[in-house]
Amino acid sequence: MQTINLYEAKNSFSKLVAAAQEGEVIIIARNGKPTAKLVALDYGERSNWSESVRAFMQEGQYDEQAFEVDRSDVLAMPERDLF
């Protein structure tokens, strides 16, 4: 992952697009503050996420069985209210 300022990104945009196409993630900063991310269109598809998670990210399809949240560290109601 590389970070580049906006001015430099404008001057070398075609090179940055080629790098993103090869799988690199480019962060574009404005005045030193990260502002945008340049990635290939198939960036999320290259991972080993399950089909359910990919469908959620791409199309918004939600499958309750695919997402499990570990709530074992959540305090019981009376204990939570003490803090």
Image (tube, grey):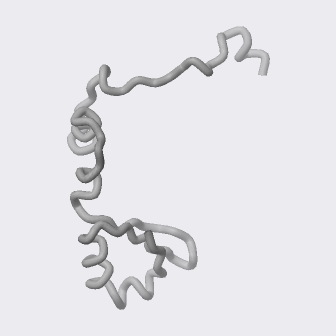
Name the image quarter holding residue 64: top left
The relative height of residue 5 versus residue 56 in the rendered view (above or below) is below
Q: x%, y% of residue 78? A: 71, 9
Between 50 and 29, the one lying in front of the other is 50
Q: Is residue 45 above or below residue 69?
A: below
Residue 80 location, x and y as percent? Answer: 70, 17
Q: Residue at x 36, y 90 (%)?
A: 11
- Along the horizontal axis of the image, is 30 left or right of 46? right
Q: Find the residue positioned furthest to the front.
A: 48
Q: Is residue 71 above or below residue 18?
A: above
- Residue displayed at 22% across by 38% down: 55
Residue visible at 27% across and 36% down in the picture: 50
Rendering coords of residue 22 (x, y %): 26, 71
Residue lying furthest right = 82
Q: Is residue 19 left or right of residue 29?
A: left
Image-quadrant location for residue 36? bottom left
**Up-down relation of residue 17 to residue 45 (above or below):** below
Task: For the N terminus, give its image quadrant.
Answer: bottom left
Q: Position of residue 53 (x, y in %)?
A: 29, 36
Farthest top residue? 78
Residue that appears at 65% across and 11% down:
76
**Count the marks: how many?**
0
Q: Quadrant location of the C terminus?
A: top right
Front in this rendered view, residue 59 or 26: 26
Left or right: 35, with 54 as reference point: right
